[in-house]
Image (cartoon, grey):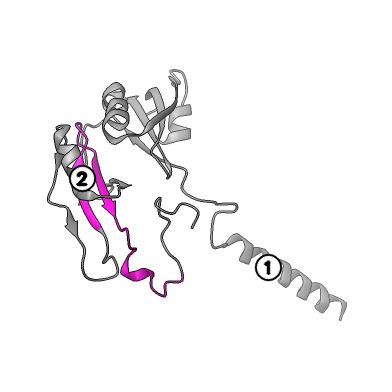
Amino acid sequence: MKYAIQAAIFAATLFGSMGAASADSIPGMRGHDHTGVTVPDMKQAVDFFTNVVGCKKAMSFGPFADDKGTFMQDLLGVDPKAVIEEITQIRCGYGSNIELFKYTAPDQKDATPKNSDIGGYHIAFYVDDVAAAKAYLEAKGVKTRLGPLPVKEGPAAGQTILYFQAPWGLQLEAISYPDGMAYEKGAETVLWSPKDPAK
């Protein structure tokens, strides 16, 4: 009987700890803090984000390198001789931050991904009026794509979108959904939105 109780306690402890190890989220995770983007020219990138998009520079720091060991590879998964010349963090209205990196590395590739490429990405900014955003961007000489495109069907109905590009090819998007999106009616989880940051 004593061994049966000990076995039950052991099993409960083992399976209980296994349940804790396979938690539903990273312990203490609160939300998206920033997106990091490597840029070819820091001055150009900061100028674009601050003087065209309307973000604000918060801080810059660096450089970082390890010319004797593998610190950069161990920490960041890059070539051991990679150098981060500068990191600049910017804030864009209500939302998570953007962290800009200026790297040099022996194996550095210069290949800006398309949205359809694996690993491709874009950064979206919520705006009140996508048509006004397009007119403003084009007046600033920014390359825009088809749009404003209103989404009228499906769960994303209510959105209007427009893709545009930074001078070095980074894909960006202007998006608006002033009356919400169709999926929100009865949704258990709604997407965070900078138009209502506390929600």
**What type is the residue that disc 2 sits on?**
Ala
- For residue 16, the mark is 1
Residue lying at 31% horizontally and 70% vertically, measured from the top left: 182
Q: Is residue 171 left or right of residue 31?
A: left
Percent x, y for residue 178? 32, 58
Q: Does residue 37 appear in this view? A: yes
Q: Secondary structure at mark 2?
A: helix
Percent x, y for residue 18? 63, 65
Percent x, y for residue 80? 40, 27
Instruction: Quadrant for residue 157, please give it.
Output: bottom left
Label 1: how many Cα within 10 Å (few below 14, some 14–19, many 20+): few
Instruction: Quadrant for residue 183, please give it.
Output: bottom left
Q: Secondary structure at mark 1?
A: helix
The magenta segment: 160-188
Q: Does residue 81 appear in this view? A: no
- For residue 181, the mark is none
From this view, report whether residue 114 is shown above or below residue 98.
below
User: Of the residues under marks 1 and 2, which one precedes in the sequence?
Assistant: 1
Label 2: how many Cα within 10 Å (few below 14, some 14–19, many 20+): few
Residue at the outermost bottom position: 1
Q: CA distance from mark 1 to mark 2?
A: 55 Å
- Taking depth in this image into account, of 3 and 180 the one nearest to the observer is 180
Percent x, y for residue 81? 38, 23
Residue lying at 27% horizontally and 64% vertically, measured from the top left: 158
Residue lying at 66% horizontally and 69% vertically, measured from the top left: 15
Residue at the outermost right position: 2
- For residue 132, the mark is 2
- Magenta stretch: includes residue 184: yes
**What type is the residue that disc 1 sits on?**
Gly
From this view, report whether residue 46 is shown above or below residue 36.
above
**Quadrant location, the N terminus:** bottom right
